[in-house]
Amino acid sequence: MKKHVIISLVICTLCSFSLVTGAPTETLPAPFVILPQPQKLILLEGSGLVAERLHQLFLKGDFKCPVMGDRLTQLPVSKFSGKGTLELILDKNLTSIPSEEGYIMTISADKVEILANGEAGLFYGCQSLEQLLEDARDYQKPVPACKITDYPALSYRAVHWDVKHHLDHMNYYYESIDRLARYKINAVVFELEDKLRYRRQPMVGAPQSISIDEMAALTRYARERNIEISPLVQGLGHATYILKHQEYAYLRELPWNRWAFCPLNEGTYQVLFDLYRDAIDATPGSRYLHIGGDEIGNIGLCPRCKPTADKDGMMALNLYWLKRVCEFAKENNRIPIFWDDMPLKYAGVIESTENDELTPVEIAKAWERGIPKLDSLLADFPKNCVYMRWNYTMARQPGNISTLEWYKSHGLNAMIATATNAQGGILFQADERNKGTASTGISTIRSFIQLAAEKKINGELCTAWDDRSPHMENRWPGFIASAEYSWSPNGRSLEEFDKAWLQKEFGLSMPDYLSFNNQLRKGSMLWYEAFFKNGNLLSDENGLQSVAQLEHWLTPLEGQERKQFDYTTKLIELPDLKLTGSWSLKYKDRLDRSVIEMNNYKEISAKLTELYNSAKRNRYYWLLSKALYDFQITAPRLLLALKESDSSDMATQKAGFESVKTVMQEFHQRWENLKSVYCQTRFISNPPNFVPDRYFHLASQREDLSWMIQAEQLYYGMIEKWLPGEH
């Protein structure tokens, strides 16, 4: 026993000595958090910094004072340093940090010093200090005396804003730039499609689109916060936003198919280059031009292209287009970024990047056949291009590793792209962990970024596709996770990230966040499925508009459209009042799930209200969450009301009818509430003169937000005819 006591005393003494002498530690003492996690932190002697003691700013070096947050921006600039000073020092000869975005911050009881070799480093040091001062205010504690040495693992840390199906208010974009800068994101790839008011090809810009001057102003605002906005203008494929106009029909690969341009029609490049020029004007000073280039099916079919496709293969047409647009980008001082799936598809190795069911032998054989094909095309791969390897699942499929290694070994620049909404849900996003390759959510983001860091890939993009148009707030956990792991890939665990995210975004603590999110997600899945016989709202086959089948994986056929028919046949039938009980038996699984959701409703709803009331910042996130949850709960309520109606007991049946009417009224109220919450940050309808861009994306099926509730509108119409005395 005495021996154990002595050992314990020695350990305690060593621990105390480590704090006194400045031994490295991994994290700040609770409750202080910096997100992303810094690379290195040393606790120092002293009582720490009381935030109110900082009362002035001193600048040392030739630089412009960085943009600061709410607390630091209030400090007046002084000609002298001393106690109570935040001292910013720019030393371009500093070699102890490997990046101009890095910084060394020393915090003592009466002073803070931030040292950097680049202005971006001073900016990020101030962002970290802002977070610490925020915690000091929230928890009424002094900031610990410490020394932080910090720098990013990846130099290009981008998120993707896709506005093909909706636009947010401009002030929301500005607020989002501030929010991204706080977490050291340094780039936004803004996928414009028809939401830029093009000057050279004005027909392409939608009536409600952002003007070039407005986008340029946002770009300048972002750059002041060390964020570079680059435009993404889809080119050869994904071109429906251009080719939907009859005036551009002559540029289609096939007259009746709006998906792809003809790559050998010179008019293609006249139009695309005009759009690129306008996009460049809208993002002054940026380095990159994202040219798209993914999923280019439906070429090599017209009289111009077919001889080339027959002789040299469709890849020759893809690379001809790529070479032309890369030459344009170079002439206009932009670096093109290109989605890389088509060369991999041509080489026969694309399956190895996304299919976990392939055996190692199958993958090895695919690459044995594929590498000679890729090597044979190497001379046609533009060297001024960045090849974006995109993968939205757990990323260690052998094909992704081999692709990144092939790029590196052949001197081609590569980046990686992950996704914040890989499953494309429109309510609460999936976040499933510890499921190996089947994991979803932030696990997949961390997975690919860690692989990129291991392979010395210096850039990542967290995509946020608008196909099903979830509210942008639903994407923020993924955006912030990409910020965390692109700065410090092997830092926090996922559970530690949850805690840091809740504290930094909202000033909240919730030990059971993941299980809480999964409960919300289960309710979403029930809402998606509730009224469909097969599949769910997110299934392509359940589209409730007759739209052209423009899917890139289908062979285009003239006049190919979904046939007009009664779409209510896709929906579940209503109870047969002459055969009571059979409906409830048939849909027992949904009804059982509905009972679970209703049993959880009171507790979850109260929790969301508590989170909204308790949040110290970004309360809109919880306002939206509450509106979404209250809306999705109407589906199980209606199913259970229909079950009550499905009874041979007349009194029970009559009560069920009244319950159905009550739920229908409640649905309309909650739908109006949800729209009012959405309206606070985004436009929820297109103007009357908008030219519809119809294809298989769910969000393209209506000109307003009601694409979300097409099933309810049809099903409730069926109910009105079914209810006794209602027709």
Image: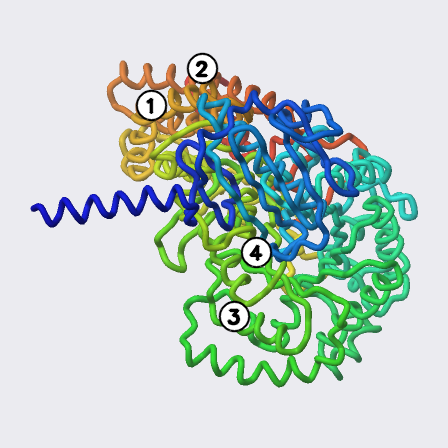
Is 330 on the left-hand or right-hand side of 430? right
Real-space Cα separation, disc 1 to disc 3, in angstroms? 45 Å
- Between residues 280 and 639, which one lies in front from this camera angle? 280
Residue designated by label 4: 153
Q: Is residue 439 above or below residue 308?
A: above
Residue at figure coordinates x 55%, y 40% from the top left? 106
Residue at figure coordinates x 73%, y 27% from the top left? 78
Q: Counting other residues with Cα less than 10 Å from the Cα at mark 2, is it few (<14), some (14-19), or many (20 or more)?
A: few
From the top left corner, tell me how far across and down residue 18 is, in percent: 37, 46
Question: To which quarter of the image does residue 336 belong?
Answer: bottom right
Q: Is residue 159 above or below residue 404?
A: above
Q: Counting other residues with Cα less than 10 Å from the Cα at mark 4, is it few (<14), some (14-19), or many (20 or more)?
A: many
Is 38 on the left-hand or right-hand side of 579? right
Label 4 amino acid? Ala
Pick whichever of labels 2 and 3 is earlier in the sequence: 3
Q: Secondary structure at mark 1?
A: helix
Q: Secondary structure at mark 3?
A: helix
From the top left corner, tell me how far across and down residue 708 is, in percent: 56, 34
Pick whichever of labels 4 and 2 is earlier in the sequence: 4
Q: Is residue 436 visible?
A: yes
Q: Is residue 577 visible?
A: no
Residue designated by label 1: 603
> Dots 1 and 4: beta carbons under 8 Å?
no
Q: Counting other residues with Cα less than 10 Å from the Cα at mark 3, is it few (<14), some (14-19), or many (20 or more)?
A: some
Pick whichever of labels 1 and 4 is earlier in the sequence: 4
Q: Secondary structure at mark 2?
A: loop
Residue designated by label 2: 725
| Foreground: disc 1 or disc 3 | 3
Residue designated by label 3: 401
